[in-house]
């Protein structure tokens, strides 16, 4: 019917059209044809206000669903229902070696919190106390990037007490735990009530009334909220109890450093007789494990997968979810077992194979030919997490990825009015983009995809494309390039031949 209003029309033009159609059907309303009339002005004003209201209603609705939410604060509220704890910033971390020129006659104490710096001024500190014992000239120490901070509060005696840490400091993120499930596990947040340490847990629901526990919730990208129980689920700090929070703040992925980049000791170091000592420090491996907090898009992708995994490792998807939940800077994960081969390879029975591509912090792949040892260091930490959460006993084999360098020879004919250098530049850009999009683990390079890509470029009349897998192929050919599960394709060179 012409006079029936569509109440879900939410934009200005639709509302105005609906109103005109309705009012024109009413015999008493005649003031709709003249653009300068009062009635026409009211209709347009109403349509404008309606458009604004519908926009706000739609935005509010979108912020209520995981797949459409855009504001970080809102997605943090939604994922509470999934019992998902988003990843905070991870300070880059690893092992440094403190050395002395010759063996000393006393033990040398390297205190917890000993501050060291990279050549670029990035700060690290030791996570516990170490000793360089008599007769030795070096000792390995685990360090984390960032600074150690303390905050103090007074308990107010109420239930569900909340305290905020670092929420206004945009220079540093509050850190995530590192060296998880190892003997040197480092807790990025420690909390004491009247000098007694309380335990950080993920959820208060299983706590007893006297359990000295608390939870940490992400408040924004930089800060966190600490919340205590209500006396039914978790104990309540009493009025005027002294609450002390010791925590790590770091700069996330910007804190990653190259090997031998840490060179300066900022803290004075003494031996057991309190005699000042001169030591040197260096890191043998690069640190590539620092990462920023999970973004809205990462949470949107990871939270449902992790919820489905039930925090245990059985399926391939479970392992992927656990890795993505706890580790930053991962570009691609490939996991396979015997049934993933065609035909199944039963020599892999009860073995899970895991291969990663790691981000260097700028969206580029960390080159395994240069940093293969760092991949293995990354895998050591991942295996500690998986070992703690697996539900069945399986062998786990970790693969350092292999780069497959691919060269192309492109014979093409251009249309007469086009310039060869412009066409070749366009082809080069298109091929570069193709390899960025397809340069992941196990992705074959299809000859037909390359041909179709070049044929679609303006100015190309026709082309012949030949591919070469640089290590194994003796010459160029027109077949697809097959990539194994632990390999990824990388563009090496393009040779242009104009017909």
Image (cartoon, grey):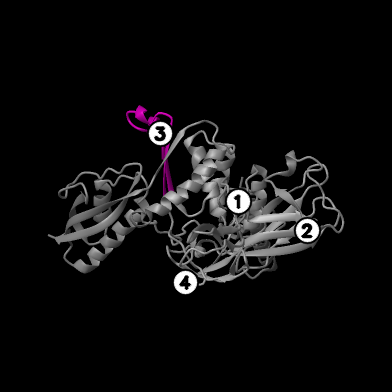
Q: Which residues are magenta?
A: 332-357
Please report whichever mark, 2 or 4, sits nearer to the chain's N-terminal start: 4
Residue at the spot of label 2:
243
- Which mark is in front, 1 or 3? 3
Mark 2 or mark 3: which is in front?
A: 2
Going from N to C along the chain, the mark reached first, 4 or 1, is: 1
Residue hosting label 3 = 337
What residue does disc 4 label?
119
Q: CA distance from mark 2 to mark 3?
A: 49 Å
Nearer mark to the viewer, of 1 and 2: 2
Question: CA gap, disc 1 to disc 2?
Answer: 25 Å
Q: Earlier in the sequence, mark 1 or mark 2?
A: 1
Q: Nearer the viewer, mark 4 or mark 1?
A: 4
Q: Are marks 1 and 3 in contact (CB under 8 Å)?
A: no
Label 4 packing within 10 angstroms: few (<14), some (14-19), many (20+): few
Quadrant in which the C terminus appears: bottom left
Classify residue 431 by image quadrant: bottom left
Q: Depth check: give the residue in front, 474 or 28.
A: 474
Instruction: Work out how far the residue at label 4 is from the one at label 1, CA to CA, in angstroms.
Output: 32 Å
Q: Residue at x 49, y 38 (%)?
A: 317
Quarter placement of the N terminus: top right
Label 1: which residue? 86
Q: In this view of the protein, which residue sits in the foreground, 41 or 168? A: 168
Q: Are marks 4 and 1 in contact (CB under 8 Å)?
A: no
Distance between mark 3 and mark 4 Cα atoms: 43 Å
């Amino acid at each position: 019917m012409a006079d029936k209003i569509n109440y879900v029309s939410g934009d200005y033009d639709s509302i105005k059209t609906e109103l005109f159609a309705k009012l024109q059907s009413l015999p008493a309303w005649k003031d709709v044809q003249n653009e300068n009339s009062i009635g026409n002005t009211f209709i347009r004003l109403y349509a404008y206000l309606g458009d604004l209201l519908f926009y706000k209603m739609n935005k509010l609705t979108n912020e209520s669903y995981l797949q459409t939410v855009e504001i970080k604060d809102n997605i943090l509220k939604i994922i509470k229902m999934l019992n998902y704890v988003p990843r905070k910033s991870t300070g880059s971390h690893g092992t440094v070696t403190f050395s002395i020129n010759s063996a000393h006659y006393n033990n040398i104490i390297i205190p917890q919190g000993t501050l060291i710096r990279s050549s670029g001024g990035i700060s690290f500190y030791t996570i516990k106390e170490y000793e360089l014992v008599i007769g030795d000239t070096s000792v390995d120490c685990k360090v984390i990037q960032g600074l150690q901070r303390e905050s103090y509060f007074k308990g107010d005696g109420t239930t569900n007490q909340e305290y905020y840490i670092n929420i206004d400091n945009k220079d540093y993120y509050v850190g995530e735990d590192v060296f998880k499930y190892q003997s040197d596990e480092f807790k990025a947040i420690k909390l004491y009530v009247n000098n007694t340490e309380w335990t950080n847990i993920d959820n208060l629901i299983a706590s007893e009334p006297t359990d000295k526990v608390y939870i940490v919730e992400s408040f924004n990208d930089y800060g966190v909220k600490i919340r205590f129980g209500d006396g039914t689920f978790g104990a309540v700090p009493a009025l005027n109890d002294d609450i002390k929070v010791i925590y790590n703040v770091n700069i996330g992925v910007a804190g990653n450093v190259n090997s031998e980049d840490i060179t300066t000791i900022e803290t004075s170091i003494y031996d057991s007789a309190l005699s000042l000592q001169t030591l040197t420090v260096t890191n043998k491996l690069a640190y590539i494990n620092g990462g920023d907090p999970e973004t809205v898009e990462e949470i949107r992708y990871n939270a449902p997968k992790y919820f489905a995994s039930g925090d245990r490792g059985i399926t391939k998807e479970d392992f992927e979810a656990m890795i993505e939940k706890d580790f930053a800077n991962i570009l691609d994960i490939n996991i396979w077992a015997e049934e993933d081969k065609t035909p199944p390879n039963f020599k892999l029975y009860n073995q899970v194979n895991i291969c990663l591509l790691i981000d260097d912090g700028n969206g580029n792949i960390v080159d395994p030919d240069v940093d293969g040892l760092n991949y293995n260091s990354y895998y050591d930490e991942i295996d500690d997490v998986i070992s703690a959460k697996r539900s069945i006993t399986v062998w786990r084999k970790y693969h350092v990825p292999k780069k497959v360098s691919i060269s192309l020879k492109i014979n093409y004919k251009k249309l007469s009015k086009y310039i060869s250098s412009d066409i070749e530049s366009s082809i080069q850009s298109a091929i570069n983009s193709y390899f960025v999009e397809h340069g992941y683990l196990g992705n074959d390079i299809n000859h037909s995809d390359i041909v179709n890509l070049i044929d679609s470029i303006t100015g190309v009349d026709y082309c012949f494309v030949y591919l070469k897998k640089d290590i194994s192929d003796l010459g160029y050919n027109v077949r697809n390039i097959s990539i194994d599960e632990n390999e990824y394709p990388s563009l090496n060179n393009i040779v242009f031949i104009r017909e």
